[in-house]
Amino acid sequence: MISKKMETALNTQINAELYSAYLYLSMNSHFNSVNLQGFANWMRVQALEEMTHADKLYKYVADRGGRVVLDAIDKPPANWGSPLAVFDDVYKHELKVTSLIHALVDLAIEERDHASNTMLQWFVNEQVEEEANADALVQQLKLMGDNGYGILMLDRELAKRVFTPPVQAQE
Ligand code: FEO
């Protein structure tokens, strides 16, 4: 059985992951509106991944005898000035999510909740990847500056990203 405190904290994280999906869907829509379909594809895959993050936590809370209570999801921004501005926001957002995950691990340790700690280690590792991916794109976009050809080449590259459902989602 999960503690009330951990149940509440994980519910808050479910909301944060769903907000992440919302944010990336909004970025998908923004890129569609400026005809950068590859960037839009990257964001759509990112949004789908965020939904699997929420689902992983959702299932975990239920498996531990807790109760998932869904809250309202904040409205994300809708427009950005450039691809770099978008990815700057992605990177900042992922840093914030990392700090939320780390706070959850701290709580699990404080509560001696070994099951939650173990489950959360997946997210700790995932955040290393999330930050690295976003940072790599920020750095590439900074190098390109206003080079339209470079942006179009990167757009083609990002069009190749494919969503791979996690094993748990197939159960
Ligand atoms: Fe669910 Fe992008 O972290």
Image: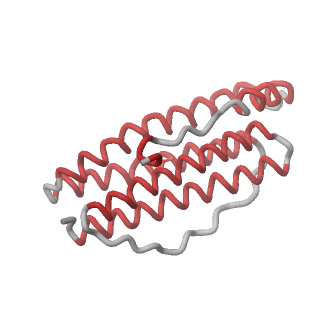
Foreground residue among 38 and 82: 38
- Total tally of numbered discs in the picture: 0
Q: Residue furthest front?
A: 171
Residue at screen point 65% across, 33% down: 161
Residue 27 relative to residue 134: left or right: right
Report x, y in % for residue 139.
63, 29
Q: To which quarter of the image does residue 140 belong?
A: top right
Foreground residue among 55 and 142: 55
Report x, y in % for residue 102.
33, 49
Residue at screen point 53% across, 54% down: 51
Residue 59 relative to residue 38: left or right: left
Foreground residue among 140 and 53: 53
Residue at screen point 54% across, 46% down: 49
Quarter of the picture holding the N terminus: bottom left
Report x, y in % for residue 159.
73, 33
Q: To which quarter of the image does residue 162 belong?
A: top right
Residue 36 relative to residue 168: left or right: right
